[in-house]
């Protein structure tokens, strides 16, 4: 029986950090990096293989000479594309990255027809939709990373506000990975206690605002590039859930087909993630305010898809 294989397209900060996380967990035998700068990728691959050897893990990291080397991957992670600069929104990257994803997906479809695809490239929901269209894969195979990341960010801000409960905080964020994401404070808890019992509405509103702006806050500090540690760990957790058939409930970007009343749109929702990829989309009960926020989030993604359709990327 062959060992598990994960290919990562784009070995920049996010892609290489995903690779490092996976290499040091020992859950995958082979990691393939595919990047436009192969020499830099080889340097990172050697360093990571040696790190795995230090902890006596069996993982080997190497660099692809071409797309044929990613053939038969269990999971393909797409982290290629332009990153945000200060003052840019995720949406500003729309056409630049859509063109890149279209070319990548043509090769993924050719070599990895049975693989699961995890999308990281922004704007995340729109790029996940492009990947679904360009590969023709079914909805259980193509998954966007962002909800797990956004929920983690919200949890960190809850801890900052409370000052206690670290490791016991569970936050939930639905909707698109953008300014209209929907942090659900009613479903966010500390050791099972709702944060509405622990924080004032003003404090919760501040947490929600900061969660929505978390990526831009990091970009503002870095000046060049964007977040990569948290996005990478969120991605590696998704890989682990698939490879170990863990059937974990994670918020991820998926194609809706009637859930929450929407179809033919990608947005963030809780899913059961296991060996079959997206095994179930879970519909949580939303109140009227949350439904309105979720609708705005869906509409913001739909607007991006409309722009791509106008440019001839696909016909919906």
Image (spheres, rainbow, N blue to C red):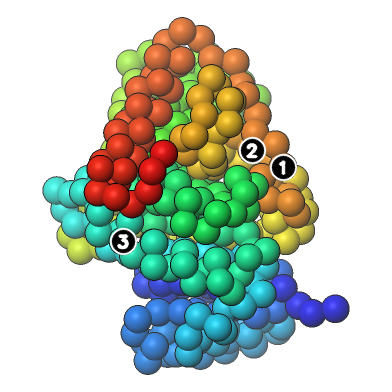
Q: Which of marks 3 and 1 is in front?
A: 3
The x and y percentages for residue 231 are: 45, 55
Q: Nearer the viewer, mark 3 or mark 2?
A: 3
Under circle 1, the secondary element is: strand
**CA gap, disc 2 to disc 1?**
7 Å
Q: Which of the two discs, 3 and 1, labels the residue nearer the N terminus? A: 3
**CA gap, disc 3 to disc 2?**
28 Å
Mark on residue 99?
3
Mark on residue 271?
2
Name the quadrant of the N terminus: bottom right
Q: Is residue 104 at least partly visible in the picture? A: yes
Q: Looking at the image, which residue is at 57% across and 84% down? A: 69
The x and y percentages for residue 188 are: 54, 26
User: Is residue 192 depicted above or below 85 in this figure?
Assistant: above
Residue at image mark 1: 279
| Image position of 56 (left or right of 21) | right
**CA gap, disc 3 to disc 1?**
29 Å
Q: Which of marks 2 and 1 is in front?
A: 1
Labels 2 & 1 near each other (Cβ < 8 A): yes
Camera-nearest residue between 155 and 212? 212
Neighbourhood count class around disc 2 (C-alpha, 10 Å): few under 14, some 14–19, many 20 upward: many
Give the total number of marks visible in the rendering: 3
Q: Which of the two discs, 2 and 1, labels the residue nearer the N terminus? A: 2
Under circle 3, the secondary element is: helix
Labels 3 & 1 near each other (Cβ < 8 A): no
């Amino acid at each position: 029986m062959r060992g598990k294989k994960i290919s990562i397209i784009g070995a920049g900060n996010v892609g290489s950090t995903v690779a490092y996380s996976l290499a040091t967990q020992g859950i995958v035998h082979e990691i393939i990096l595919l990047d436009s700068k192969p020499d830099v990728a080889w340097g990172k691959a050697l360093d990571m293989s040696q790190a795995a050897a230090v902890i006596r893990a069996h993982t080997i990291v190497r660099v692809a000479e071409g797309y044929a080397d990613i053939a038969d991957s269990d999971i393909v992670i797409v982290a290629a594309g332009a990153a945000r600069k200060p003052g840019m929104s995720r949406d500003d990257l729309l056409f630049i990255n859509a063109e890149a994803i279209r070319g990548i997906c043509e090769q993924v479809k050719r070599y990895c027809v049975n693989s699961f695809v995890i999308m990281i490239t922004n704007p995340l929901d729109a790029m996940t939709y492009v990947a679904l269209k360009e590969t023709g894969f079914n909805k259980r195979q193509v998954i966007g990373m962002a909800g797990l990341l956004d929920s983690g960010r919200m949890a960190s801000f809850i801890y900052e506000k409370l000052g206690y409960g670290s490791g016991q905080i569970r936050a939930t964020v639905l909707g698109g990975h953008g300014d209209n994401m929907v942090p659900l404070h009613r479903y966010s808890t500390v050791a099972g206690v709702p944060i509405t019992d622990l924080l004032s509405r003003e404090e919760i509103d501040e947490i929600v605002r900061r969660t929505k702006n978390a990526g831009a806050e990091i970009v503002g500090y870095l000046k060049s590039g964007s977040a990569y540690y948290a996005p990478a760990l969120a991605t590696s957790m998704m890989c682990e859930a698939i490879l170990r058939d863990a059937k974990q409930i994670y918020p991820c970007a998926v194609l809706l087909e009637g859930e929450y009343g929407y179809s033919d749109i990608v947005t963030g929702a809780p899913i059961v993630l296991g060996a079959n990829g997206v095994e179930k989309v879970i519909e949580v009960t939303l109140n009227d305010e949350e439904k309105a926020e979720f609708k705005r989030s869906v509409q913001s993604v739909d607007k991006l898809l409309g722009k791509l359709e106008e440019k001839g990327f696909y016909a919906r």
